[in-house]
Image (spheres, grey):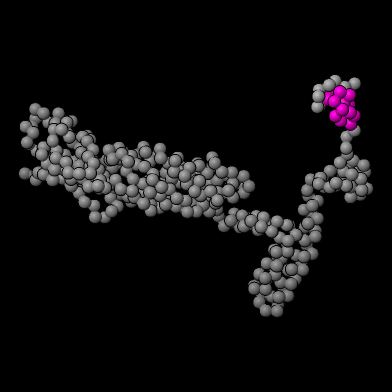
Amino acid sequence: MAKIMEVIEYFDNTGNQLVHRVPEDGSGETKIGSQLVVRESQQAVFFRDGKAMDVFGAGRHTLTTMNLPILTGMLKGVFDGKSPFRVEVYFVNSKVFTDLKWGTSEPIPFRDSELQMIRLRSFGIYSTRVKDPQLFVNKMVGTQGLYTTEQIDGFLKNVIVSRLADYLGENYQTILDVAQHYDELGTGLKARLQEDFGKYGLEMVDLYISAITPPPEVQARMDERAGMAAVGDLNQYMKFKAANAMGDAAKQEGGAAGAGVGMGAGIGMGMMMPGMLQQAMASGPMAACPKCGTQNQTTAKFCSNCGGPMAVTPATTPCPKCGKPVASGSKFCNDCGAKLG
């Protein structure tokens, strides 16, 4: 004859169990009047014949017809209320599980408005807890006697990474803007994930993004842009690059020979700079001089060939009604609307 469970309880010594069923294998016999002990960090889901009867919070509960009315109805006419019946009790850990790690196992594609299509890696930590124990047991645990954080870890990681890819594409144009908005990104992503976690009886408590990194070659391009922005002047930036080239060449060759190579590199770079600057200037937008037709930069105020002004002031005549200047040939005054001519 099977032993009747007069006191049903479970204590987790590992700290990583989400759910533990009592008994762990199959169901066990208990009876009306038995004690169910649920600790502060637990909730207990009572099952009979594969159907959830009730959820019990922390405390010592005596199984009676009052707290198990559905079960009592099922037993009516079959048992006398004192006979044993078979049940399963799932003890669900309701504490917040912290420091759970997530990250991209493979880079995620991101269409950057400035750097084109790039692939990003990201990682961070999150915390979660079971919010609806009955839904969690039915959706995730099933008939397993033991369910740990390791068993659900891979699934939750994939959900986070999938939503991260969507959220980045919907809210950011370039990776250059992301680094300074990690907190904002984490908050928005957490809100997006609540619905996904909620479908399984879980709640996302916290989500933190530690880093979002592009591949090395893209990182090098970002560093180049940052260097130019910091210097703020193309000429100064080229001098800075020339000095770096001299230093690198000296380190690679060593001694006097290296110094000579570095000097040659610096001189070569110095000779190249005027041509590069001219090319950069020439490649900008141009405009024809209204007097001689010579091409000049659009920012020029006077022609580099004839010295004439690049901007021609249009001829105007005063409005006969309000006296404001109006472009010659206009049919109406653009200030008072009076008809002209």
Residue 280, how many percent across, how many down? 77, 53
Residue at x-position 24% and y-position 55%: 13
Residue 72, how many percent across, how many down? 14, 31
Side of 166 relative to 133 (left or right): right
Q: How many marks?
A: 0
| Residue 162 seen | no
Residue at x-position 50% and y-position 46%: 184
Task: State the image quarter where residue 37 is shown.
Answer: top left
Viewer-nearest residue: 160 or 190: 190
Residue 275, how many percent across, how many down? 80, 58
Task: State the image quarter where residue 66 is shown.
Answer: top left
Side of 323 relative to 148 (left or right): right
Viewer-nearest residue: 129 or 248: 129
Residue at x-position 85% and y-position 29%: 324
| Residue 242 within the segment the image draws in magenta | no
Residue at x-position 83% and y-position 21%: 338
| Residue 330 within the segment the image draws in magenta | yes
Side of 33 relative to 223 (left or right): left
Outermost residue to the bottom: 256
Residue 219, how many percent across, how many down? 58, 56
Q: Which residues are magenta?
A: 316-333
Q: Which quarter of the figure is the N terminus placed in?
A: top left
Q: Main secondary structure of the magenta part?
A: loop
Q: Which quarter of the figure is the C terminus placed in?
A: top right
